[in-house]
Amino acid sequence: MAARLRTAARLRTATATAVLGTPGAPGACGPVRPGPGVPDADPPVLGVPVPGASGPDASGPDPSGPGGSGPPVPDGDPPVLLAVAHGSRSAAGVTASHALLRRVRELRPELDVRHCFLDLARPSLPEALDALRGRPAVLVPLLLGGGYHLRVDLPGALAAAGLAHLPLAPALGPHPLLATALADRLADSGRPADAGPVVLAAAGSSDPAANADTARMARLLADRLADGRPVVPAYLSAARPTPQQAVAALHAAGHRRVAVATHLLAPGFFAARAAATPARWTGAPLGTHDAVARLVALRYDQARADRRALAGAH
């Protein structure tokens, strides 16, 4: 049993390393700078640069499989990839969520990729679970950090549908692939490499552990930017500082060239709030960036490998 678990762990580690290289270490809340130091957020993108490569869209050879998401676990007909987004009243937000899943299908054409929402849009999660009609599936939350949805809502919906046995992947973040997408969005906004501090604007949560995920993501973004500038985690709801407060504090400290990195997947209410600060540059939501699509597929592969390892251990 222990040998099987070690084999699965090696598979997951090799998959992540092939996609990313070695990720940065976590560190502490507050302004985050590159280097050692951050302990351990929630509502809904093309070319992933490889460190050291050149050109506007240098992705380099990737031995890890289609789309760089890691090798699919072999096994006949693969389970459905059921992506679960937060949902939004914004038509643009829902459209962006669908577009992200189209990109996942392009990267992994062998998969049956389906999509549903926790709230505010359809199909709902119960509808999508019912539509499986007994087919195996892996649920991949399109959430950028942990929190109540991941701990309570998703397991509760699976239990209510009699499908508690289905694998549930972790949140997308924190993860170095998200740092790649955030850095690209900042560059697209016009922020030069020698600019000042960055405010990482996340949704925010009443769950301290979820907000700690945002602090870890700030650490990863600081490592990815590698310019020595602090990255300050900020929250659009439920926690402080807000992006407005964080930008104001940096201005008061003498930093005039402040940027906001929008740590959201899609346009909508929170994205509009993130864009309303007096920062000089604001990155767009992550949308359909290839790094995010690759991360969705990676989470699917990891959750599937974990479940196979668990089944083999019994």
Image (cartoon, rainbow, N blue to C red):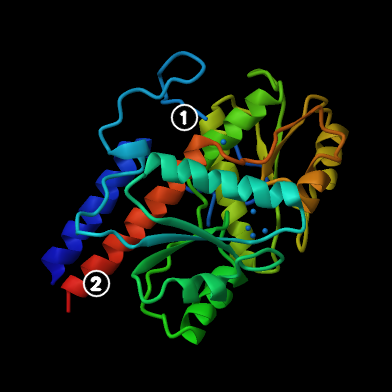
SS type, badge 2: helix
Q: Residue at x 38, y 49 (%)?
A: 298
Picture quadrant of residue 262? top right
Is residue 32 left or right of 68 when viewed as pictured? right
SS type, badge 1: loop
Along the line of sight, which residue is nearer the eye, 50 or 130? 130
Residue 184 at x, y percent in the picture: 58, 29
**Inter-mark Cα distance, 2 to 1:** 32 Å
Along the line of sight, which residue is nearer the eye, 36 or 214? 214
Residue 245 at x, y percent in the picture: 84, 46
- The disc at residue 48 is 1
With respect to residue 41, does 107 lie above or below? above
Q: Residue at x 36, y 43 (%)?
A: 69
What is the number of callouts on the image?
A: 2
Extreme residue toward the top, this view: 55
With respect to residue 52, does 200 lie above or below? below
Residue 172 in sight from this viewpoint: yes
Residue 37 in sight from this viewpoint: no
Classify the position of the N terminus by image quarter. bottom left
Residue at the disc numbered 2: 310
Q: Residue at x 76, y 46 (%)?
A: 271
Classify the position of the C terminus by image quarter. bottom left
Picture quadrant of residue 19? top left
Residue 265 at x, y percent in the picture: 63, 47
